[in-house]
Amino acid sequence: MLRTLSIRDYVIVDSLELEFHSGFTVLTGETGAGKSILIDALALTLGERGDAAVVRAGCERADISAEFDIQLLPALELWLRAAELDGDAGSILLRRVIDKNGRSRAFINGRPATLSQLRDAGEWLVDIHGQHVHQSLLKADAQRVLLDAHAGLSALAAQVAEAYRRWQKFAQARAEYETHAAQRNAEREQLQWQALELEQLALAPEEWEAVQAEHARLSHAAGLIEGVQAALDTLSEADAACLPQLSGAGARLELLLVYDERLRESFELIRSGAAQVQEAVYALRHYADRLELDPRRLAAVEARMEAIHGSARKFRLAPQELPEHLRQLQARLSDLEIASDLEALVKQEQQARSSYFELAAKLGAGRKKSAAKLGKEVSRAMQGLAMAGGRFEVRLNPYPIEGSVHGAEQVEFLATANPGVEARALAKVASGGELSRISLAIQVITGKAALVPTLIFDEVDAGIGGGVAEIVGQQLKTLGRERQVLCVTHLPQVAAQADRQWSVSKFGVEGRVKTLVSVLDGKGRIEEVARMLGGTEITATTRKHAAEMLSLR
């Protein structure tokens, strides 16, 4: 719901900070005081068009911000995260700045955004019923979603959408097969011989490194044998080998330890060195026993390396990349084999199509039943809102093409406020007041199913009074139990039903007009309702009447 609205230098508003609450709130005041201006300002933060004319005279820019609680709108939070526009958890801040040259900037949670993104976010947040275009009930998608939600068909509609996408996937695969069959066959033949060559090569993932290591060892076998023997001679086998000399030096020092213990450290180092040299000798002898010249094995390894190099050059890859390339070739061939089975594709497409139309028919039957019921209920509600003889219809128009992601029919809301007049699309209802009251009737009937948390009614009381006005107020109050409702009104019968009341007034300061919004307490509400009842001259009788109206709410 709407938490706060901040307005700077907008039309006749210099500075306003408004804090909102749940329930039903009315904005009242003299004509021209600026009540609707507040709604217009909010609409700018929801993506409506604005120009330099909205900037207060003598100011550089108009700046409007609106903060909303979105804890109950997880889908909007996901949308914000996907668009990298998320902010504080459970909250969204929309801001619009328009300068005196007409340049407009938009922000969501402090980050630059487009007007389209503002409108997309606003669709989740607010419905403004009146002369504004920001009203979801005028949009075909919102009408369909509302009907499905009211009828308990949302889950079935989601199944229909998924079934349609699955059907189209198979239909597209079949069409692509028929269009690109020759091209796909040529690709498959090319991939088959490439895969066959690599399969015959049979290069294991780690084999290239092992082959390289073995080739290095075999090609340098003579040098390895010679080097190892030289090391053995030096360490232990030549006449002047170091190991016998180390052992002899250690033995002589060990005899001298009796006379001077300070020689022990040197003795221990020599003994340790002799032990390590002995270990090296053992290891070299073991290596030498297993090392031999093998020209035939060397030739085989060199042939293997040449075969690997040949394939690598042909595929323009490093040798170690060949196993992974073979895996990719085999995966692509598998895909082509699946796609090349036309009979299977046609069968899958037909099964998916049948499943879709079975679900769509079930959805259509549910919509037909609910459309008739909703039409009667809203028409009945309209009778008490100064639209005697008025009628509301939910028309289901078959799609001109074979089905759609939303089912087999389009949902359209139509209405007429007068008897004998043909019902027309909601967007073509002439009077803003009539449209607001029709919207009110729809919202009251579908209140639990509707998703938008904040409803604003402007001109809902145009052309009505007396008992009808009281009914309008009662219905707004009922709607306020489900959602946040704001209403601009001139009728005391409507104002008296509100949970809270704001008074909007304007006054002159140093030759300039300013707007003031006051939150009315009990006494203030009596005075304001009395003014609405009695005009400029407020009597004790008028105040008593106002108090009675407020006590009966």
Image (spheres, rainbow, N blue to C red):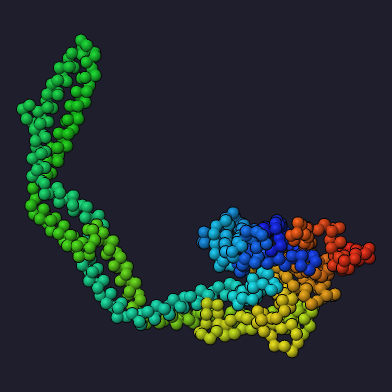
Q: Position of residue 79 (x, y in %)?
A: 55, 63
Compared across the picture, whether 35 is left or right of 452 comes to right
Q: Residue furthest bottom?
A: 420
- The C terminus is located in which quarter? bottom right
Q: Nearer the viewer, residue 61 or 160?
A: 61
Q: Position of residue 190 (x, y in %)?
A: 24, 73
Q: Position of residue 472 (x, y in %)?
A: 79, 72
Q: Nearer the viewer, residue 286 or 161?
A: 161
Q: Is residue 388 visible?
A: yes
Q: Position of residue 527 (x, y in %)?
A: 86, 61
Tally of numbered tags: 0
Q: Nearer the viewer, residue 32 or 76?
A: 32
Q: Residue furthest top?
A: 259
Q: Residue at x 67, y 79 (%)?
A: 426
Above or below residue 111? Residue 231 is above
Q: Residue at x 61, y 62 (%)?
A: 100
Q: Residue at x 50, y 84 (%)?
A: 402
Residue 150, quarter of picture: bottom right
Above or below residue 489? Residue 215 is above
Q: Nearer the viewer, residue 17 or 144?
A: 17
Q: Residue at x 79, y 83 (%)?
A: 388
Q: Is residue 66 visible?
A: no
Residue 203, quarter of picture: bottom left
